[in-house]
Image: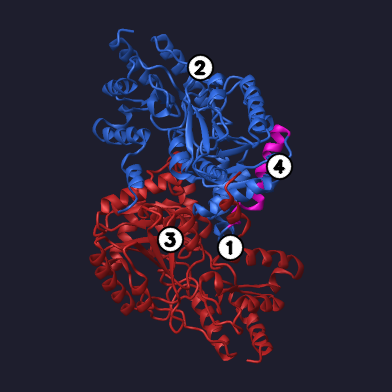
Chain colours: A blue, B red
Amino acid sequence: MINQEMMRLGNHRSVIRDIFEYGNQRAKIVGRENIFDFSLGNPNVPAPPKVTETLERLAKTDPVALHGYTSAQGSEVCRKAMADDLNRRFGTSYRPENFYMTCGAAASLMITLRALVASACDEVIVFAPYFPEYKMWIESCAGAKCVVIPAQIKDFQIDFATLEARMNENTKALLINSPNNPCGVIYSEETILRLSELLEKKSAQYGHPIYLISDEPYREIVFGGEKVRFIAPAYRNTVVCYSFSKSLSMPGERIGYILVPDCVDNAADVYAAVCGAGRSLGYVCAPSMFQAVAAECVGLTSDISIYETNRKLLLDGLRSFGYTCVAPGGAFYLFPRALEADAGAFCERAKQYDLLLVPGDGFGTPGHFRLAYCVQTETITRALPLFKKLAEDYGV
Amino acid sequence: MINQEMMRLGNHRSVIRDIFEYGNQRAKIVGRENIFDFSLGNPNVPAPPKVTETLERLAKTDPVALHGYTSAQGSEVCRKAMADDLNRRFGTSYRPENFYMTCGAAASLMITLRALVASACDEVIVFAPYFPEYKMWIESCAGAKCVVIPAQIKDFQIDFATLEARMNENTKALLINSPNNPCGVIYSEETILRLSELLEKKSAQYGHPIYLISDEPYREIVFGGEKVRFIAPAYRNTVVCYSFSKSLSMPGERIGYILVPDCVDNAADVYAAVCGAGRSLGYVCAPSMFQAVAAECVGLTSDISIYETNRKLLLDGLRSFGYTCVAPGGAFYLFPRALEADAGAFCERAKQYDLLLVPGDGFGTPGHFRLAYCVQTETITRALPLFKKLAEDYGV
């Protein structure tokens, strides 16, 4: 009698959340310090001090203005700060009117998908490995078909032959995520240019724009001299979905934005559809106080040197124990191959050492597992001998 | 090519927002102090001091814990505080597991509607006058049919004869809002009991539960010894949608909850569907810091004596000038009859005096207009002579 699909979604938590909850239960038995929880992308590096300072200062200001509704698209001050930040860093010329503030990355994506998807025939392409909720959002809420391009295992760049073969007149959008969750890989300059060329060609061929939805919560978390290319200028029909969850270490506060550049075909219509989709989904406005925080702290990041230390420790350690792993250029995830074909069985076996890992199957990439290393460095140094034992168990 | 319905929703702002934006533009010309903006339910009474104190104190705590993800249903501490508050005030025995924290009232309603509505044949009944977005949420996002019961103009209680006539086997839920936006009326004890009896009878007749969705953002804003009956215990299949926007004067912060009591038929399934709907709509969790604020400040209200003063001034004044108005028991709205049949034309005419009023048509009740009196009392004392002139223009 009630909505069975919603009930199923509620009863079957995401695999990641399941493992996270298992860790919470297990911590009660063996102690939090003995759980090596690499399951959740919940940053363990504090927000920049300026976030705290800004909160304290704002709290002393007029509460009516501070906590009141903003316009549905976000306060003018906040949207101007978003534009200024990107313009300064990337030489763009965005205006406040290009931005729509949201309740975080999930909201950014849901609103964008709902704005763009017009019929059940529409297809949205995602690239494995991909964030598991993508498929659910595309199918369950936006009502489109989700087309998965299998992973190019050797480097996690795009398998263009397969991509081109899977595109057709119903292709409405591609959803990309670089730096990537779960593998940390950044799309190369070559990948982005080739993608842009292909999308221009196919848009012309099919006679309608193919949108590139760029999910960029890890844009600022980049290591070792890697330069993250800002994707929007490379392809004109790009809609950017951003979140401050990871860059400012405040994932619980639900603040992000959608950027619809002027160069998008029928940009005013797309922006209006974004506003309409936000309204239709019950997003009245993004949280007011954190709009003000984001306006002041945009461009800052948490101390990502901690992630860089963690990444090196883990990558070097795992490789020395015989694990195979593509080196990630950003985010805070590793996505090594599991030591047996069934990554689920591998992750179960890892639990014997209280190593909490997420099988790659949910990310559309069996035979791999995800490690979220946004943890204390000490957690990694103490976990490494356990990864070694685990490899030895497999005779590696 | 993009979603035309979303574009239409984005281009056609709600009437209320339109008038609010008109006021902002007009204020630039004649000065903010000369605009008598009664359009928006944006409380002009500050949040209780404890909200500010709590924010300042929380800002000094561990940012990783403060700003991190909570469970999708909300932190245990917060949900326990919600249960304790209702149990203390209403003698109920709710548990934290009955609560799902949300990003405000709109999110509470959207998630509940999406959890309950299972097919396009499902009907959700609303009672005029109703909040204009109800119809859009029911139709556009939940995908059900919205059935409107016309207003019982004399007292804005329920027209039971019409309600009973409009119910049928497809009736999935009734959506009520007491104290009411836009008329401020509180459902009487008699109305609630009669409604409960009717719903029990009809649920038995149709062989399935009819849910009562009780939208209660104004539950704590009640005047002059009126007692607001907590509706959930009166009818077992009630799902409560709450928001702190109005009670704590923080509408921009997007924090509220859904309560699914144990006595709801298949309560565990309904709760699971609520979790699934939240996930499907991209609501990852309610804002973390304001979950903590809500946990500490639940049960408090802003200084509602200001609203009570405003209400008396306006109601007495308008009546003395010849306006007809049902006396509201709560919220911060008046819903008088317009002085001509076309409320839109009446509100246009009021603009000559910079009185910004909202026509009742969008609330499903033509011939009336809404006044949101959550403004400075001085705004009302200065506006009253203008209302008098307006009545005189009509020869009243």
Quadrant of residue A323 in the image?
A: top left
Return the residue at label 4. A262
- Marks 2 and 4: which is nearer the front? 4
Q: CA distance from mark 3 to mark 4?
A: 37 Å
Q: Residues within 10 Å of mark 1 (few under 14, many from 20)?
A: some
- Identity of the residue drawn at 71% across and 37% down: A87
The C terminus of chain B, quarter of image:
bottom right
Return the residue at label 3. B145
| Labels 2 & 3 near each other (Cβ < 8 A) | no
Q: CA distance from mark 2 to mark 3?
A: 52 Å
- Identity of the residue drawn at 57% across and 43% down: A116
Give the main secondary structure of the magenta stretch: helix
* Helix, strand or loop at mark 1: loop
Furthest-top residue in view?
A: A395
Q: Nearer the viewer, residue B26 or A282?
A: A282
Q: Residues within 10 Å of mark 4 (few under 14, many from 20)?
A: some
- Identity of the residue drawn at 49% across and 47% down: B59
Nearer the N terminus, badge 2 or badge 4? 4
* Helix, strand or loop at mark 3: strand
Q: Is A72 part of what is drawn in magenta? A: yes
| Labels 2 & 4 near each other (Cβ < 8 A) | no
Question: Mark on residue A327?
Answer: 2
Callout 2 amino acid: Ala
Which residues are the magenta region?
Answer: A70-91
Residue B294 is left or right of residue A226, and the answer is left
Return the residue at label 1. B14
- Marks 3 and 4: which is nearer the front? 3
Callout 4 amino acid: Asp
- Marks 2 and 3: which is nearer the front? 3
